[in-house]
Amino acid sequence: MIEKNNPNRKELCEAAIEKIKDEDIKYIYLQFTDIHGIIKSFEINSKRIDDVFEIGENFDGSSITGYGAIEESDKVALPDPSTFYLLPWRKENKVARVICDIYKPDGQRYEGDPRYILQRAVKKAEKHGFNYYCAPEMEFFVLTPDTKQEFKPSDLRGYFDYDPYDISEMIRYKIADYCDAMGINVECIHHEVAYGQHEIDFRYDQAVNTADNTITIKTIVKTVAANQNLVGTFMAKPFDGINGSGMHVHQSLWKNGNNMFYDENDKDNISLLMKKWIAGQLKHSREMCAVLSSWPNSYKRLVPGYEAPVYLAWGFRNRSPLIRVPDFHGRPNAARCEIRCPDPSGNPYLQFSVLLTAGLEGILSKDIEISEPTDRNVYHLSSKEMEKEGIVSLPGSLHEALREFKNSELMKEVFGETAFKNYYYAKLEEYDAYRVVVSEWERNRYIRL
């Protein structure tokens, strides 16, 4: 991440310009996300890149969700040169991409830019001496479309299945290859539990870099699948009856080069600071759920029985609570916690923003309540059983999550007034569009009653 006033910016801009000349790059995609996390992009002629690096490129933001009304539509996309990469799948007529920060015409940052929202959260942590690192496990499906635009899994394989001649194997290799070409250090990529489902894990980094990598991987997956006449999707729950796709986020907090989540004197080698971080995220989990699981479809995944955490608790080896501490074998640099409710369909800039702010609030609070870890497995409890036992869970729908979000002072702090309203109303509109649709399940169940 290189912001406008960073002293290294000039050097990186010059390196990008030199690359453009050496590789004879004709066009450059300027990219950013709308408030939902959908990648937006427009192309400029590479001959103009000197000026665009200097002053940015104007665009009309009135048609970008979350970017303001028509009377305040003018925006400026200023490229971050640290995100400049050639698109490895464009072998002829070479094209590059660069991720942009969004400004207003007066030179001030646009407060509704999701990348800016995360940058603000990061700076708040830095004022307290902390650096936030995170790494998501991104699950996705590769699907085969038919002539009726219906979809089915592209394979019938399961968890960790291997076949060197299978198209899925070649797709995963190509995804990893393209990630490497775009500066993303892939640590593991494999087949997941469900048919046609896969997972890609990449090395942890500071939050903004990780969010940039996350949206880049989405583009890579979709591109590789499309080149095989398949569809790559990060939809949380494309099929009923099988596991959905999550995005478990591993998190750690560092200070002066030390992992603050590690404590050699604790019996589990985890620090009080980590426990307070977890407590902060548990305390605010229901109100940030509308960001971590941000589509109506997300709540088809967050149900008991499909390895999706709905229980507001934390533990160690147990994967059913919302947050767990993976076994890091006593290695100080590997100490971390993993929150398991986010899914990959959302906006990673906003997801990491709320996670960072909620965790930091737990650390800074003088009276945060730290619960005991639990090893109880609640995966197989139904909603009815959880209700009877008084087990607190995540919201059961986007509508319920939005009620929690709307009343949250912490979410207003994270987003800022403009973005908070933009996000709330955009998601409310999405839920309204969802709830008026009559499904096949409803017709089958109720028509003859």
Image: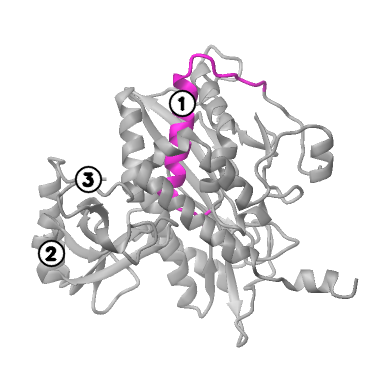
- Decide which of tag 1 and tag 2 comes sooner along the chain: 2
- Decide which of tag 3 and tag 2 comes sooner along the chain: 3
Residue 288: in sight, yes or no? no
Mark 1 crowd level (few <14, some 14–19, many ≥20, 10 Å Cα): many
- On-image quarter of the N terminus: top left
Look at the picture and state if 358 lies above or below 249.
above
Side (left or right) of 174 relative to 117: right
Give the camera-side residue of 424 and 209: 424
Residue tagged by mark 2?
Answer: 49
Mark 3 crowd level (few <14, some 14–19, many ≥20, 10 Å Cα): some
Which residue appears farthest toward the right when viewing the image? 449
How far across and down, in percent of the image, does residue 378 sit?
77, 38
**Tag 3's secondary structure?**
loop
The image's mark for residue 361 is 1
- Residue pictured at 32% horizontal, 60% vertical: 69
The image's mark for residue 153 is none
- Residue pictured at 49% horizontal, 46% vertical: 136
Colour approach in the figure: one colour
Name the amino acid, label 3: Ile
How far across and down, in percent of the image, does residue 230 sit?
53, 76
- Decide which of tag 3 and tag 1 comes sooner along the chain: 3
- Residue pictured at 21% horizontal, 45% vertical: 3
Quarter-of-image position of residue 371: top right
Q: Nearer the viewer, mark 1 or mark 2?
A: 1
Name the amino acid, label 2: Ile
Magenta residues, as a range?
344-372
Q: Is residue 400 magenta?
A: no
Residue tagged by mark 3?
Answer: 2
